[in-house]
Amino acid sequence: MARQLLLFDDHPCSTGMVDYVSRHETQVKRNKDSYRKRMDNALQRVCKFDTMHISTTMPTLRPYEIESVPKKLVPYNVWRSDHSKGDCVHFFINDCMFIGLLNASDDELHELAEARYVITPDFSQYADMPPGQRRHNCLLNRMVAARMQSLGVNIIVNATWSTPDSFAYCFDGLPTGCPIAINSNGARRLDTSKYLWRRGYEEAIRRLRPSLILRYGPKMEGEREDVSVYYENEHLMRMRHGS
């Protein structure tokens, strides 16, 4: 692109555009370096948990129970602005809004203990991601969840998956017989996504045998409604209805 722009030396903006491209490429490199640094720091923090066995298995979360069903699920970015809103924090938002948790101090993570419950992180696992990236994001979810639990945060695990090959690891380390949270936003758009969601849902029920399911997003066909409580995406509802 820079070579093409240099052909237009008579254009008064050509040099400025080349400088812009150069600055943009430099910023991209800095962002990547910063991300890698945060990943390294996060791994160093979680490796202090001897029970995790990071090199061979997913971190293992302790079994837990909740006293009562949450009345409202509040996204993490909203909760940060006002800790009094809602009694259950969730991370069903864009990854960039909570990536800072990877390098958060113990004090920063312990602030989440102010919430009655916290659904564990949801670093994305899209079907079109490379397999290694999907497994990596699953590890990040478990790493942060384990740190939260060790700091006294009352967690509710988020069960998430992508394609059937992810079943080999995506439920590892999650306790059985406990409440879980499952998100269905975006799963109804295509027949393929509905199929993949349904396969993962059935596997989650079989493997985890949840006592309660906090369901974020629209109902899907064939769910276990007898053990499910449903919560709407309030941000999406406000966008639709303009309120």
Image (tube, rainbow, N blue to C red):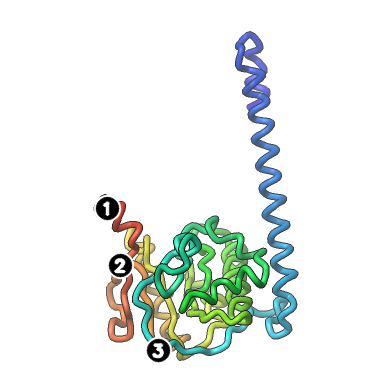
Asked where in the image residue 209 lies, by quadrant, the reply is bottom left
The disc placed on residue 211 is 3
Q: Position of residue 69 (x, y in %)?
A: 36, 83
Measure how far apart labels 2 and 3 are at the Cα level.
20 Å
**Which badge, 2 or 3, is on the more N-terminal residue?**
3
For disc 3, the neighbor class at 10 Å (few under 14, some 14 to 19, many from 20) is some
Question: Can see residue 190?
Answer: no
Q: Secondary structure at mark 1?
A: loop
Q: Amino acid at mark 1?
A: Ser
Q: Which mark is residue 243?
A: 1
Query: Can you tell which of label 2 and label 1 is closer to the viewer?
Result: 1
Secondary structure of the residue carrying numbered label 3: loop
- Mark 3 or mark 1, whichever is nearer to me: 1
Q: Does residue 134 appear in the picture of this structure? A: yes
Cα distance in 3D space between marks 2 and 1:
20 Å
Q: What numbered label is drawn on residue 45?
A: none
- Percent x, y for residue 97? 53, 57
Q: Is residue 91 above or below residue 241?
A: below
Q: Position of residue 172 (x, y in %)?
A: 57, 81
- Determine the image quadrant of residue 234: bottom left
Residue at 69% over, 85% down: 51
Residue type marked 2: Pro
Earlier along the polypeptide chain: callout 2 or callout 1? 2
Residue, disc 2 = 218
Q: Quadrant of residue 135?
A: bottom right
Could you tell me residue 184's position as x and y percent? Answer: 37, 67
- Using the image as rendered, state which of residue 169 and residue 230 is in the foreground: 230
